[in-house]
Amino acid sequence: MYQIKIIDLHFKEEKNTIASFLISQNDSHVLIETGPESTWESLVAGLQQHGLKPGDVNAVLLTHIHFDHAGAAWKLAEEGAKIYLHPLGIPHLASPERLWNSAAKIYGEENMELLWGKMKSISESRLVAASHGETIPIGDMTFTSLHTPGHASHHIAWQLGRNIFTGDVGGVKISDGPVVPPCPPPDIHLEDWKKSMRIILDQNPEKIYLTHFGEITNPNKHFALLDNALDDWANWMKVHFDNENPIEAVEAAFQTYTTRQMEQHGADKKLQLLYEYANPSWMSVSGLMRYWQLKKKGKI
């Protein structure tokens, strides 16, 4: 029987912000998510705790190509692993310059390597497209690819038995904190996101695994909370969009709004900081404002 191990990547030297999942059975070893290259040493240390080195990993399954999920995939590919991902993501990992430059516009070029480390191209011979519903046999394990857009157009949730690794379409929940939706630009699509949650729940999972962060044993309750939070944030943002409020003012007001929500949930300052590392509030402003802009133009 396979074993699922959670590797804490200690993003920004903190616990419980970004996870990688090691699934092993006999001599087969799979990683779901790699985290950014900036946390490579933590990933290697996590593998070592289970008696493995990067070259022992047969396959990497990516939920999507955002840096906090896939930034170190190239290093596993160099060690011999096959990288499974959504077809739309393959050109960006084969030639990551556009992906890097797009992220640099959001984070600032001066912050990129500090946050995410380095990004190198992956040979297309190592990149494998996974279609919706496709089964991927790796050793004695069989994973199923569930295309689940909404957070990103190229998003996959990976199913193994009654366990599903939900990436960011499963939201963020750290420790005893609330369930919140990560909503960065440019692909936020509320209707698709809600359909994707239904796709996951229709598999009747016993557990879901969040990249931010860890194991959830009551998927139905979790997704109900996520659905409510997604509506809450989107509707809050629409008021500011309709009023054409300046983006800087909206970011400041949203920070205050989400901080109040965290406090009402009992989250202390340290837990609030971990949420901000995993899911920066200003990014959700940009993503949701873009969603309403596209909605107004009839492009969604």
Image: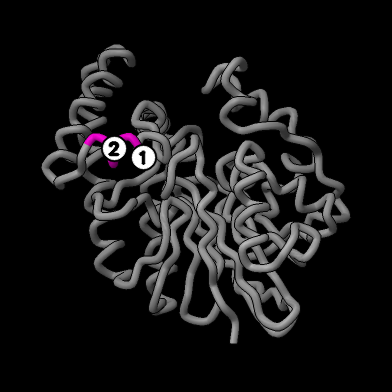
Out of 10 and 63, give the one closest to the viewer. 10
Is residue 291 in view from this perspective?
no
Q: What type is the residue that disc 2 sits on? A: Lys
**Residue 258 among magenta residues:** no
| Picture quadrant where residue 71 is located | top right
Residue located 50% across and 33% down the image:
186
**How far across and down, in percent of the image, does residue 179 sit?**
28, 52
Q: What type is the residue that disc 1 sits on? A: Leu
The residue range painted magenta reads 269-274
Q: Going by the image, does 149 lie left or right of 277?
A: right
The answer to whether marks 2 and 1 mark residues whose Cβ atoms lie closer than 8 Å is yes
Q: Going by the image, does 255 lie left or right of 181?
A: left
Q: Quadrant of the C terminus?
A: top left
The residue beneath circle 1 is 274
Residue located 72% across and 78% down the image:
137
Within-10-Å neighbours for mark 2: few <14, some 14–19, many 20+: few
Q: Quadrant of the N terminus?
A: bottom right
The residue beneath circle 2 is 270
